[in-house]
Every structure is written in C-alpha cells, then in structure tokens.
Amino acid sequence: MPIIFDSEKKIFKLDTLNSSYIFKIYRENYLVHLYYGAKIPDYNLTDFEKRNMYASFSPSNCNMTDCDFSADTYPFEIGCNGAGDMRISALQIRGSSGCAATDVRYVSHKIYSGKRALEGLPALYANTDDECTTLEVETLDKVTGAKVTLIYTVFEKLSAMTRSLVIENTSDKSFEIERALSFSLDLPTKDFELYTLYGRHNKERVVEKRPLAHGLQGIHSKRGSSSHQHNPFMALLKLDGGEEHGDAYGFNLVYSCNFTSQVEVDYNCSSRVTMGINPDDFGWTLAPSEKFYTPEAVLVYSDEGLGGMSRTFHKLYNTNLVRGPWKNKKRPLLINNWEGTYFDFTDDKLFDIAKWAKSVGIEMLVMDDGWFGVRNCDNCSLGDWYVNENKLKGGLSKLIERIKGLGLKFGIWYEPEMISPDSDLYRAHPDWCIHVEGRERSIGRQQYVLDMTRADVRDNIFNQMSEVFANNDIDYIKWDFNRNISEAGSAILPPEKQKEFFHRYILGTYELMDRFVKAFPHLLFENCSGGGGRYDPGMMYFSPQIWCSDNTDALERLDIQFGSSLCYPASVQGAHVSASRRTSYETKRNVAMWGSFGYELDPAKLDDETNEIVKQQVADYHKYYDLIHYGELYRLISPHNDPYKCAWEFVSEDKTQAMLTVVFRHYIEKGNFFIKLRGLCADKYYKCEETEQIYSGALLMKAGLNLNDYDDYDGESYALHFSEVK
Ligand code: DGJ
C-alpha cells in the first residue's frame, strides 16, 4: 500500500517510487510532520518532531509545566495563524468572535484508491483508480467550527503527490477565510537553493536561484493571472545537489490567478514552504454548511537533482493533467499568420499562406487576431465575435471551405475574456467589464477585462462563440488573454463579497473553458496570454498546448524554454519558427523543435532555398515527434549556468533513440568541447545518424562526444540523432 496508517504509533506514511512522506498525530491531536525525502522502508522517526525552543518566548498551550512543546517551533502539516505558531501560516480563519486565531486538530481520516475531483477547479486526475491513492485527514478548529480536510494523493509510480484543503463551516455562524493556502511543508534545514522562474512579456520563466536565508523569501502574483512575472513554480535544491544529483523538491500550483509561493526560514533554521491563493486582496465568507476548495499543489521529490524532478513533472503532466482526445494524439503542424501579417490580411492572403503551407507539408492554418468586428488594430471590437466581411469576403465558412479544399485543418483566434471600449458589446453593457464604481477604468492594450464572475457575461460569450463553432468546420482555438486586471470589482457582487472577486473571476473562466471543452470535444485548444502569461498547470488542464512566448527569436527563446522545462513538458510548449531577425533557419528549427512545433511567418518573403529547408524541417518534425513529445529531457548545458552555449537531449523511454541539440549563443575562443550524453543504456550501441559512427551508450555517457569540429560561431547550432543498433 502506498499509504499506511500505524494506529498504534499514530503515524501516516505516504510512499512513491522514490519518496516517503511521513507525519503523525501528536499529543493533543496536533498533526506533526516528520519527514519528506528519499524513500525509506521504516518510520521509526519518533523524535523527529522535536525542535529547539525558547520556552519563555515561544508560547505553549499544552498545559504542562515541563512542556517542551511549542506551536512556534514544531513542524506541522498545516501551519495555522495566531495560536502560538509565529511562522508564515497556511490557514487563517476569522471566526464570528472577530478573532483570527486558528487551530485545527486531527479528528479522523480515510484512505482510498484513486482521486476525487476538486469542485470548480482544475486538478490532476487518475486514469484508473489503481494509479494513485488518496488520504483525507479531517481536522477541526473547535472554536470557529471550521472542518478542514487535508487531501493528499500519491502518484506511486511517479514520485509525485498533490495536496489541497477543503474547508467546511460546521458552525451556525458565518466565518471569514483570510488565508487558505494549499499546503505548508516544514523541512528541518535551510541548506537549499531556492529556484524560481521570473520574467516579463517576451522573456518569461527565466531561472533565478538564491540560497535560502532567515526570514521570508518568495514570489507572488496580484495580476489576476499566474503572470509573465512569476510562474507558480518553485524548487528547492539541496546545497550539495545539481542538475542530475542531490535532493530536489519541486512545487507547482494548479491555478491561473493570484498566487503566493513563500519559504520562511525560522530561528531554528527550519524552512516552511507554502503555496496557494494570494491572501492579498482575498477573503471568503463561508456561511454555515458551505465548503471552500483550495487549488491543488503538486509536490515532486527527486534524488536525481533538478533533472530528475523535471522529468517527473513532465511525465505526470503528460499523463495526469493534460486531457481530452488531443492528449496522446499527434498534434497538427501549424502555421499561424500573426507574425506574417499582423492585422493586415484578407481571405486571399490567408489562402496564399495555406497554399504554401500545403506545398511544404504543414497541416493546419491558424487565423490569428483581426478577423472579427472592425478590428484592424488593437483598439476595438473585442467582444464582437462576428466576422469582418470586408476582410474575409464571403464570410468565415467560405474561407474555411477554401482552406479545407486544400486538405488543411483550420484554427481561429479568440480573446474571450476581453472587451474593447469601442465595441458593440461594451456600448450595450458598459457594466460588464471589471470596474469599481466611481474609479477610472484603467486601460491595458486598449481593452478592459470582462467580469467572468457573472453568469450572464459567460453565457453571452459562450453563445457567441458556440454559434461560430457550430456553423463552421473549425479544428483549433487559440485562447488569448492580453492584459492584467486592475480596479478589481464586479457590478453584481455585494460589498462584503468583493474580496472574493479574484478567485470568483478564475472560477468563472474555468467554468467557461470547461463548457467549451465539453461542448466541442474535438477542438484543440492552445492557450496564450501575450505569449506565456498564463503558462500554468491550471490552463494545461483545459488546453494541451500553450503559446510559450511572443518572443520567437531562437537565441532569446533558449532562456525561456530552459526555464519552462524545469516544470512543464515539451508537448505543451508552443514553439514556432519565425522570420525573426537573427540566426539561420537551421537554428530556428533546432530551438522550435523542442516543443509543439509550427511556423509563424509570411511565406511570400521566403526564397526557394528556404522553402526546401522548410520541407526538410517538416519531415524531421514527423520523424522525431514521438521522441520529443514523449521522450525524457536532459538539460546538458543550461543558459543559467553557461552564457555562451546550451545543449539538451531527448531520450526515448525505451532508450533506443536520442537527439542531442547544441546551440552557441556567443562566439567563444575555440577550446576543447567534449559533451557527455545522459539517460542512455550503457550496454546498448548507438549509431549517430549524421556521422554514421557507432558508439556504446557507456562511451557516450562516460567519455562523451568530441564536438571540436562543429562550428561554434554566434547563433550556430546542430542536432545529432542516435539510434540503437542491434
Ligand atoms: C498576443 C499573442 O501572444 C500573439 O501570438 C497574438 O495572438 C496577439 N496576441 C494577437 O493580438
């Protein structure tokens, strides 16, 4: 059994392939954390809960004169506010007394196979009940009547687990939830480097690392989305660890709105890790017998460093997060017209692009922004989802008929959550956008955000869009979101519920997405938010692809793709070859091949030689699709460690195929360049397709390859492919 409970010792043990997670019911029914790390067979950890304490200052409520227990220092399964624990808390409930001291204690538990869905929220799922096991621990704060259920699911074969809370009001008076993070985890040391992914538009998810220090450190978003600026991901790597060795813990929140992710190192050098809904600008009134579900957090442990941690996330998300018919189906190779034409296109221009696409083997045309209302630039028409017949003569159906006549699939762009002030929708419903009465409405990209907390708003958008989907043969939707939320408020929420706005916003968006996914299951959704502003597992639950960044420059993309890969699989990563200013088409291809590959350019500007190159790239896309989408990733040289060159490798799960890619960002004086491959089978022999040389896996991994003969000028790159020879 992956989860056991020793009723005598009152210990819970949650095992996966490579990890153990252990806690116990202690003294007056506290839930005390004992261990999370490499798998161990037993659980004789009786003394692990003990921490140093200064008895006079760290309060204790155990009513014992010789008390060596204090809520201020003990490691807890869920850190509560104001009842002696002075560290950052995961839970804070303001009861009907007006006080916010919170103290939940164990009541009961149950263990079962499989995993339950979280009401209204995206979450990991079990394909079959034997894939994972769940422990639900019921606790109670006897003063407020908050019943808090701690939910743990272990994905036994993947060294991963999920955690979340359900809060239920069992009292007869309402209370206020002021903090409801998804988990807290108390690790006994501060000997870690903290890894986070920071960025901005055009430069998302850049790796940043820093050693833990006393006090608080972390990231958050208050933008109404998970954001370009900070991804809801964090990792802790033991100070003696590295890319392929040492203890690594990864944390990721399945949520697309305001989040917090913090570590506090206390005076005993213990580290409390927390993650969940950002308590800034959040509160939730829970009436008697109502329930509140927190988003789910994913926890991964690896003793193979950051690389092992990433590979676990990748497998987990490919198997237990991404859903629908496109989950394991080969995605169509697409061309998107955005960077080729921007708003300046007609049906004939799109048809020309499609003809070229067909001639080189591309499978789908995606028509981007500008096809609806009177939209010729970004200052109008969002919300008016009817076709602009001045651009598309004969309408959408006519265009689709022409594209389909070529044998191509057809995709279309939407920004469903937005409204332009210059739109029919806004003129009819000026109160449908997010706003605060009496305050100026801040504009972002010349648009406002629709109030997704409102069912009437969601219904309107659903009806407009479904009419288009029902009457046209559409295969793919690009779902965009191009500004952050300000003046957060809804015209229909009463004053006491305005603090619930942000969470209600994202629940509304999820509800709308879910409706589309269910009503039009054949559609392939690609999420986007000015590139990767909502590149999070919440969105991945609805769309198996996300446009990684608006920055399509191959060399700039390296930082972005390496950073994204810490947590997210290649199959999700939208990556296109564009006409961007630098590098050869070979380098563009080598970088974009690490993802859901496609094109984003005006083919009329390509010469014959480039057309031939594209044909070869298309053939390569098909040939290496499975290796990249389902293979295991090894980051051999990461840009956050080497400013000059990068290298990565995909190895098929059965270890019969591998692909090594090397990119030089800056010319360096020629020196020896030997590279050791990883993840191969030492006993197998592999033939390099390009050189026809045969090597053992052991040689490639231990001695490495001598790459001195390859060009290493700015922007040069190459890919080498290896197949097993019997
Ligand atoms: C932002 C997206 O990231 C781009 O790819 C493009 O779709 C534009 N929006 C269109 O406005």
Image (cartoon, grey):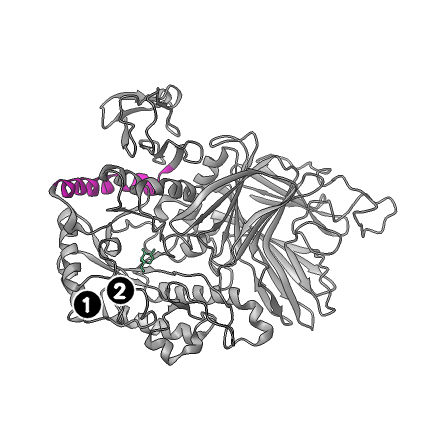
Q: Residue at x 49, y 65 (%)?
A: 486
Label 1 belongs to which residue?
391
Locate residue 659 relative to residue 83 in the image: left or right: left
Q: Amino acid at mark 1?
A: Lys
- Residue 615 on the magenta segment: yes
Q: Position of residue 504 (x, y in %)?
A: 51, 67
Closer to us: 210 or 325: 210
Indicate the quadrant containing the N terminus: top left, top right, bottom left or bottom right. Answer: top right
Q: Which residues are magenta?
A: 609-632
Image: 354 above or below 630: below
Q: Does the residue at mark 2 contact the one at mark 1 (Cβ under 8 Å)?
A: yes
Quadrant hosting ligand 1:
bottom left
Q: Residues within 10 Å of mark 2 (few under 14, many from 20)?
A: many
The image quadrant of residue 699 is top left
Q: Residue at x 71, y 65 (%)?
A: 144
Closer to us: 143 or 84: 84
Tell me the CA gap for discs 2 and 1. Answer: 9 Å
What is the secondary structure assignment of the residue under circle 1? loop
- Residue 592 on the magenta segment: no
First reached walking from the N terminus: tag 2 or tag 1: 2
What is the secondary structure assignment of the residue under circle 2? loop
Label 2 belongs to which residue?
370
